[in-house]
């Protein structure tokens, strides 16, 4: 007598027959996934094996000399001259220091310094330095009893570097054929100075922008000398200095100064600050 199937067995047989195609597809997908994982794993093992062998061979062929100087690829430190104090009279002073970035491929994104004289310390001076840039950092018209006492006692000014942030320049558009940082295109021309009355001295010059950039801000620092001694300093900011233009600027001092024998105008602008670069006007574009 043939064996009879139960209802559950009949239901399973019906379900399996109806879904056999789907079950077959799922099983094939699982087999394909497992096969792919095995291939990827074995391929990685083979690559790692030969790569390790090749790296070992290269390490034997290419050896780093013991005298290799990695420091030469780091930026050289910012150079500071001895800071000077300029007596403006009436207990007011200017303190200045000349700084130089000796690197052609590195710029100083931010330099923070303070001046100290004896126990007195100035507020922070924050600035930047382009490659190979030399500029004079200064604090002006300082009136402070502690500073006056320190100067009277013979204390000498010192520079303290609070922080310095370097940035390597890799884009070749910033360098000339010799690998030097390009000229930013600013020049002070036709510099003259004259005394106006008993207490006013002015320096007049033409600020020329020969670059392809419109600069929002250009820092102007003017130094007056009696021989080799700095006897006065001033800093102002020229705004909206357009490409291929020349503009007349005047810087004035409104207190008595000693005899002036020569002078210097320093121009500086941050070409890496996108906010400092203005778009061309329709007039400049010829529209």
Image: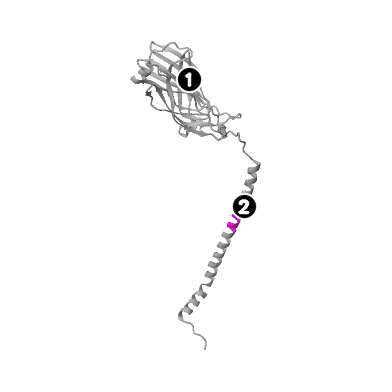
Asked if residue 22 lies left or right of residue 63, the reply is left
Asked if residue 267 lies left or right of residue 148, the reply is right
Q: Which of the two labelled residues, at mark 2 and mark 1, occupies the earlier sequence position?
A: 2
Mark 1 packing: few (<14 Cα in 10 Å), some, or many (20+)? Answer: many
Q: Which residue lies furthest to the bottom in this view?
A: 1
Pointer 2: what residue?
A: 49
Secondary structure of the residue carrying tag 1 is strand
Residue 286 visible to an observer of this rendering: no
Residue 43 magenta? yes
Closest to the observer, 22 or 98:
98
Segment colored magenta: 39-51
Foreground disc of the pair 2, 1: 2
User: Where residue 148 appears, x then y in whole percent?
Assistant: 36, 18
Pointer 1: what residue?
A: 265
- Which secondary structure is most common in the magenta stretch? helix
Q: Residue furthest front?
A: 66
Secondary structure of the residue carrying tag 2 is helix
């Amino acid at each position: 007598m043939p064996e009879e199937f139960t209802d559950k067995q009949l239901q399973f047989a019906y379900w399996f027959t109806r879904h056999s195609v789907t079950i077959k597809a799922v099983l094939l997908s699982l087999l394909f996934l497992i096969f792919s994982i095995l291939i990827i794993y074995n391929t990685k093992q083979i690559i790692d094996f030969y790569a390790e062998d090749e790296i070992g061979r290269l390490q034997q062929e290419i050896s780093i000399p013991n005298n290799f100087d990695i420091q030469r690829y780091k930026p050289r430190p910012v150079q500071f001259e001895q800071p000077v104090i300029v007596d403006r009279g009436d207990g007011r002073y200017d303190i200045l220091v000349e700084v130089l970035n000796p690197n052609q491929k590195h710029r100083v994104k931010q330099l923070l310094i303070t001046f100290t004289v004896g126990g007195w310390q100035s507020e922070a001076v924050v600035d930047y330095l382009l490659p190979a840039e030399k500029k004079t950092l200064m604090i002006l018209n300082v009136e402070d009893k502690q500073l006056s006492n320190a100067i009277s006692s013979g204390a000498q000014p010192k520079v303290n570097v609070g922080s310095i942030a370097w940035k390597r320049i890799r884009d070749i558009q910033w360098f000339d054929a010799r690998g030097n940082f390009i000229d930013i295109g600013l020049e002070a021309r036709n510099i003259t100075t004259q005394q106006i009355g008993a207490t006013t001295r002015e320096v007049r010059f033409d600020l020329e922008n020969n670059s392809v950039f419109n600069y929002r801000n250009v820092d102007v620092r003017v130094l007056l000398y009696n021989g080799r001694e700095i006897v006065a300093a001033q800093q102002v900011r020229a705004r909206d200095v357009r490409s291929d233009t020349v503009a007349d600027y005047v810087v004035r001092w409104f207190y008595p100064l000693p005899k002036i024998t020569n002078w210097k105008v320093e121009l500086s602008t941050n070409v890496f600050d996108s906010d400092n670069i203005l778009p061309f006007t329709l007039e400049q574009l010829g529209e």
